[in-house]
Each structure stands twice: as C-alpha cells, then as structure tokens.
Amino acid sequence: MVKFFDTICAPASSVGTGAISIVRVCGPECFAIMDRLVQCRSGKISEAKGYTMKRGQFADVDDVVVAVFRNPSSYTGEDAVEIYCHASSYIVSRILELLVANGCRLAEAGEFTKRAYLNGKMDLAQAEAVADVIAASSEAQHKVAMNQLRGGYSAELRSIREEMLQLAALMELELDFSEEEVEFADRSQLLGLVDKAAGRCETLSDSFRLGNAIKNGVPVAIVGAPNSGKSTLLNALLQDERAIVSDIPGTTRDTIEECCVIGGVLFRFIDTAGIRDASDEIERLGIERAFAKMRQAEVVLGVVDCSSEAALEDAKMILEKASSAAGKLVLLCNKIDASEENLLVNKNVNDINSLVLSTDYKDIEVVVLQISAKQGTGLEELRNELGNSCKISSASDNLVTNARHAQALKSAAQSLQEVRKGLGLMIPTDLVAEDLRAALSALGSITGEISTDEVLGEIFGRFCIGK
C-alpha cells in the first residue's frame, strides 16, 4: 500500500439537480477532520465501523448523512467518507470550503481513482475503464466498459503475459545451461508458444476498430445520388426533421452528423452530399467529403432511388466506391412506394439483386434491403440489420476500446514476430530475448506493471474531479 500524507476532497455528483449531492473525502486525516466538523447525534465519525452511516450536523451548514469506509476496504484503499447533503451549490461550496480550511486539499482530476490504482485496488486498464463506464450512453458501451472494469480484459492480458513469461523462462534456462549443451525446449516448441501469444495480441489489437466504434459511436455513412432519399432516411431513423428535404438536387452540400441508439449500440449517422458530376466548386467539395466519410465508416448505407431509370447505374457506382471503403454495405432499394412506376421499381430491384448475387465481394459484406424512407417501410428490418452488425455476443467479449492499448498490443505482436524470426534463423537466444522483453514491456504498459508519471498524468487528467 502507498502511504499518502494529504487528505483530499471533491464533489462526487453534479450540483443543483436532484435531491442530494455527494462530497467525497479520503486520506489519513479524514476521520479527524470529520470529527471537528460534524456533530453526530451519538458518538463520533472516527468511532464508527466501516460500511456504516451516521447522521449529524455539518458545522452550521446542513443536516448530513456520512458514510464511513475504513482502509483497506474502500475505493482508494484509504480511510474515506462520503457526505450526503442537500443539492444546493451554496451548501456544497461551503462544505468544501470548510473541509479545506480544516486540512483537506481539493482533489485533482481522477485523483481518487489514481490512488486506487497506486494502492493495488485495480490495474491501469481497469482504472481507465472507470471513465468509460461513466461516459457510457448505450448498452454496448456499458457492457464493454463493465467487462473491463470487472477485470475480464485484464485477465486476458495476464494470460497472454503468462505465456510470454513461460517462453522467457525456457529461453533463460537455455542461456544458463548453454555451455553444458542441455536443451530444455526445442525451437519448434518455442515457435509454437510465440505464435500463440502473437496471435492473441493481434486478435485483441484488431478488435480496436469495432471497440473504438462502439465506444465513440459506430460511424454510418449514408451515400447515394442526389434525390435518392438520403436526408429523408436520416430523418426517419432519427425520428426528427434534422436534414432539409427538397426535390431540388444537391440540397445537401456538407455532411450532417447525428447519433441515436439502435439495438443497444450508439450509431453516428452521417448524411452526405449527393454523388454526381459536380455543377460548382462547393458541391464538388461536398462530394469529396462524402467519399472521405465513406472511407472512415464502419457501415455504409447506399441509397438507390428505384423509381429512377438510373437506379442500376447508381447501385454500380455505390458498390464500386464502397467495396474498398467499408466493412459492410447495406444497399437500400428506396422509394418502393412509387406506385406509378411499379414495373420500373420491380425491375430495378431485381436487377440490383442480380448484380449483387453475381459479384464476389471479398473484403466487404453486402446486404440488399427494400425500403420506403418516406413511408417507413422496411426501416425496422434496417434497424435490425444495423443492430446485429455490431452486437456484442456476451459480457465476456474482450474488445479493445483504447488507442493506447491497441498500439501497445500491436507493438507486442511486432516484437513477438521478431522473436519468431530470430528463432527461425537460429539467432543466439540472448539476442532473441531482447525482443521478448520488449513484447513483455509493451503488454505491461497496458495494465500498469510498467508505467511512467507522464503516462499516468495523461490518463487520469481526463477524469472528472470527483472520481
């Protein structure tokens, strides 16, 4: 346990809303300061057992309830209290003022969680997950963050690290007994351990694309020709008149981004300019942005006006542009409600389905759906398709949502590939061991076995003050 010499305090809830506010205090003088400030109906705060609550008068400020947490069984591992008072900005400010006047220091951003990490209450990956749990706005975000906070992701990292340590031990033994020509493991066994560890690192690193999308909102680009119904579709999905809808081609000149939750996943929809030969410079720039958003998207919704003579050509254009951009393309045969052009609509739908079935798309999943964005037909099926495309199968899924972790895992995998190369070329074990140590260091930086004050400052500086 790390011994801290100062006692810190901070508000742990937003002020001015709800019935109560919470002020958190922890550190060596925690109970002594509370005894000076809180007049309990019976006994003192310092005499209370851990995980009990006492009611009293906080100076002349408010009637409060104080929850008592004793070391090491507290969030930070220190003596701590939480003060529950009325939700008034004046009351909270006055309580903090009196706490500071009696020996407390206002906490820095993330300092409570930083102390919890330094006291071994959680590793660094779990500490970072605390902020993700607080920020979660969808079921998927919450599920991934809670799995990390509860240690599922850290357990996976420890398992990989144990495999690497086993490999390191075998290599060290080989070094120790090299002069006696004793072989503890042949190179094929070592190669097998390297390949397994590298594969697990690469799998986790590759999960960052989906994990990052779930954490920040899955980017979905809505693309198509002018007047194909893109803005109408955006409004229908959002159930709000967010984008201007007009019969005039080229109404959307820039991208419009809005978020909504579907199937427990936060999606970030991006309505783009209609793709065609630009008639002016502004529209051309809007179309360039449409292509850029398509390349960045996890899912592309390609909207085709099936009441148009150009429907098949528009579908070909979308397939060509999206095939090298997205992981999934949902090709939407829109305006199937156009009754006067029923024969044309049916022909276009059949032609588009035939086009997709006759082409082999190796790097992209293509789904064709029939919708009427105006009437709402087929939108529920579209929502189901979107929800299933990014669904997390269980709470045990380990997805990397942190760019720092993804880079560390990538670095570890690269170092392991160098180990594999060295073993294959029969390079002396002591030289190969350097690459293995680099892999262990990269992995250890995620959970905090290896960390610097600069890294810790960057991580915890993003937290709110009271956490």
Image (cartoon, helix red, strand yellow):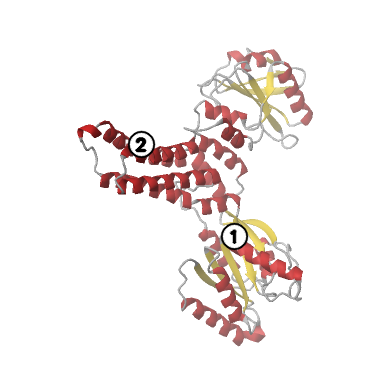
Expressed as whole percent of the image width and height from the top left, the position of residue 147 reads 49, 42
Expressed as whole percent of the image width and height from the top left, the position of residue 361 reads 47, 71
| Above or below for 198 versus 312 | above
Sequence order check, earlier mark of 1 and 2 = 2
Expressed as whole percent of the image width and height from the top left, the position of residue 425 reads 31, 48
Residue type pointed to by label 2: Leu
- Secondary structure state at the residue bearing disc 1: helix
Taking depth in this image into account, of 13 and 448 the one nearest to the observer is 448
Q: Residue at x 71, y 74 (%)?
A: 278
Q: Quadrant of the C terminus?
A: top right
Residue type pointed to by label 1: Gln
Left or right: where 260 falls relative to 95? left
Classify residue 160 by image quadrant: top left
Taking depth in this image into account, of 306 and 170 the one nearest to the observer is 170
10 Å crowding of disc 2: few (<14), some (14-19), many (20+)? some
Q: Residue at x 34, y 46 (%)?
A: 422
- Secondary structure state at the residue bearing disc 2: helix
Q: Residue at x 74, y 73 (%)?
A: 250
Label 1, label 2: how far apart the Cα atoms are: 38 Å
Q: Is residue 75 visible?
A: no
**Which residue position is annotated with label 1?**
296
**Which residue position is annotated with label 2?**
165
Q: Residue at x 75, y 35 (%)?
A: 16
Taking depth in this image into account, of 36 and 409 the one nearest to the observer is 409
Expressed as whole percent of the image width and height from the top left, the position of residue 128 reads 56, 38
Q: Is residue 156 visible?
A: yes
Left or right: where 199 falls relative to 47? left
10 Å crowding of disc 1: few (<14), some (14-19), many (20+)? some
Do residues under tags 1 and 2 come within 8 Å of each other at their CB atoms?
A: no
| Above or below for 441 versus 409 | above
